[in-house]
Image: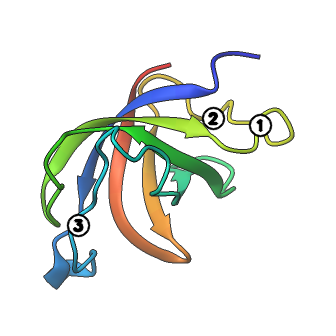
Amino acid sequence: MGSPYAEVLIELLPSDKGGRRIPLELCNDRPGLYRPHLRVLRGSGEMLGVAFVDGPDAPVEPGHSTFATVRFLYEPEVSYSELVEGAEFEILEGLHVVGFGRVTKR
């Protein structure tokens, strides 16, 4: 079993393209408050629960991108093996896709 964390580059969809209406707060002052699911593109389709535990100090506006760190919420009970370095994924809030990303370091 590897580290329960991954560094990611995410891009939020603009509001007019179906993305969030409000910015994301990902700073490490309040880690773990944003808990979406990630679904690896061309993967099994499993929705993987994560918590964003570090990110930029300023809120991330819809339509913008940023680097962040996620923690795997359900490892080892759930396998996060699809989230390898270079893996591309969707960011889901419920069943709604609000952005995309890529694992930059695992």
Task: Name the outermost residue toward the front.
Answer: 29
Q: Amino acid at mark 2?
A: Glu
Q: Residue at x 28, y 43 (%)?
A: 27
Task: In this rendered view, identify the residue nearer to me: 29 or 56.
Answer: 29
| Residue marked by disc 1 | 79
Give the distance between the C-alpha atoms of the residues marked 1 and 3, in whole angstroms: 27 Å
Q: Amino acid at mark 1?
A: Ser
Give the distance between the C-alpha atoms of the residues marked 2 and 1, in whole angstroms: 8 Å
| Residue marked by disc 2 | 82
Q: Residue at x 29, y 46 (%)?
A: 10
Under tag 1, what secondary structure? loop
Which label sits on residue 13? Answer: 3
Mark 1 Cα shell of 10 Å, populated few (<14), some (14-19), many (≥20): few
Q: Residue at x 44, y 56 (%)?
A: 90
Q: Amino acid at mark 3?
A: Leu
In the image, taking residue 22 as reference, residue 64 lies left or right, namely: left
Under tag 2, what secondary structure? loop
Quarter of the image containing the N terminus? top right
Whether the residues at callouts 2 and 1 have beta carbons within 8 Å, the answer is: yes
Of mark 3 and mark 2, the one earlier in the sequence is 3
Residue 48, given in percent of the width and then of the height, sits at: 64, 51
Which label sits on residue 31? Answer: none
In the image, which is nearer the foreground, mark 2 or mark 1? 1
Of mark 1 and mark 3, the one earlier in the sequence is 3
